[in-house]
Amino acid sequence: MAEIDVKKYVEFLQKYDGEELRLMEVCGSHTAAISKSGIKKIISPKIKLISGPGCPVCVSPSAFVDKLIELGRDGAHIVCFGDMMRIPGKESSLNEEKGKGLKVDYVYSPMDILPMAKENPEINYIFACVGFETTIPVYTLLLDAIIRDDIKNIKLLTALKTMPEAIDFLCANDAKIDGFIAPGHVSVITGTKAFYEVSNKYKVPMAVTGFSPKELVVGIYALTKTCINKDSFLKSGKSLVGNYYKSVVLDEGNTKAKDNINKYFKKGDAIWRGMGNIKNSGLYLKVEYSKYDAGSFDLIEDYKINKACRCSDVLMGKISSKECPLFKKYCSPLTPQGACMVSSEGSCYQAFKNGD
Ligand code: SF4
């Protein structure tokens, strides 16, 4: 394959002077990678790169945190990813509760809960399962191990989400996005085909791309070109979904991982923090595995900690983090007023850190 002339692509993106294009990334790792790369500052102001709901921790509703605290107060030992510790619930966070004696630990992999549970069979452990299609396969491996080793003291509290339905929700709710940078890690599991339906339905271009500065340039260039030539794509029947991350993303995705997901989980509606109920955008343990569930089905409350927080508009791409009146004044990583400022993959956190 001929070497890609990235310099030419950068020049094109710098000189672009057509209609304003709003391109949204819906992957927390893309949010962080784009912010870190500085690409927003060098491309034409007519290409707006907007962060969407790509951070799984940020979109977990307050009721999820509240339920974990409730389970902890009932005696369970809560285990979660580090970012989850600081996400606010209605009145408190896991971090604050830990300070008051709640048993909470964070780990780097859900599998780390296995030795904890085996060593302490008298303690009930709950894993706080958040994530998109990227992370869900790890939970299926955890379930495999729990069942194989007949471990009786681990349950899962889930707030699992799927991305094509969220993109559909954005398109249906006036998010005014011209094209999506499709989530790279999610696409490894789902494959590019998972995005065909939503792209066809709203005639919206999408580009699957990677995370290095070069891959980002290639993806953004290709997406911009597809947006510009959308009519001719549609006339010729060519798909508006392009795969620019072929080294790891297949059209069909990872079929084994998808089979494992379908073995344990079924689709259902889910509450996204700040966005509300999105039809069929959640995954829940199937009835036959319900004994491993810690009460994930009724987590519908989404309490706003600070009424002035504009997380919902940020997640929908309607405003940038800087346009929120609390940004940097009252809201910072040390004093987060909303979930988008808590997680390192949150749009507001990245905007604060990298000055986007
Ligand atoms: Fe919410 Fe803070 Fe972001 Fe404003 S800057 S939207 S208050 S998280």
Image (cartoon, rainbow, N blue to C red):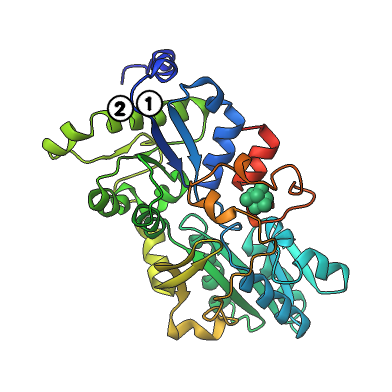
User: At numbered mark 1, what does the secondary structure look like: helix, strand or loop?
Assistant: helix
Indicate the position of residue 344 as horizontal and vertical percent values.
66, 46
Please state if 317 lies on the left or on the right of 308 as rendered.
left
User: At numbered mark 2, what does the secondary structure look like: helix, strand or loop?
Assistant: helix
Residue of label 2: 225
Indicate the position of residue 23 as horizontal and vertical percent values.
41, 37
Report the residue at 56% width, 71% height from top.
158
Q: Which amino acid, mark 1?
A: Tyr
**Quarter-wise, where is residue 247 in the image?**
top left
How far is the residue under mark 1 from the one under mark 2?
6 Å
Label 2 near label 1: C-beta < 8 Å?
A: yes
Closer-to-camera residue (232/2): 232
What is the total number of numbered labels drawn onto the structure image? 2
Is residue 343 among what the camera can see? no
Please state if 222 lies on the left or on the right of 80 as rendered.
left
Indicate the position of residue 317 as horizontal and vertical percent values.
48, 46
Report the residue at 62% width, 80% height from top.
151
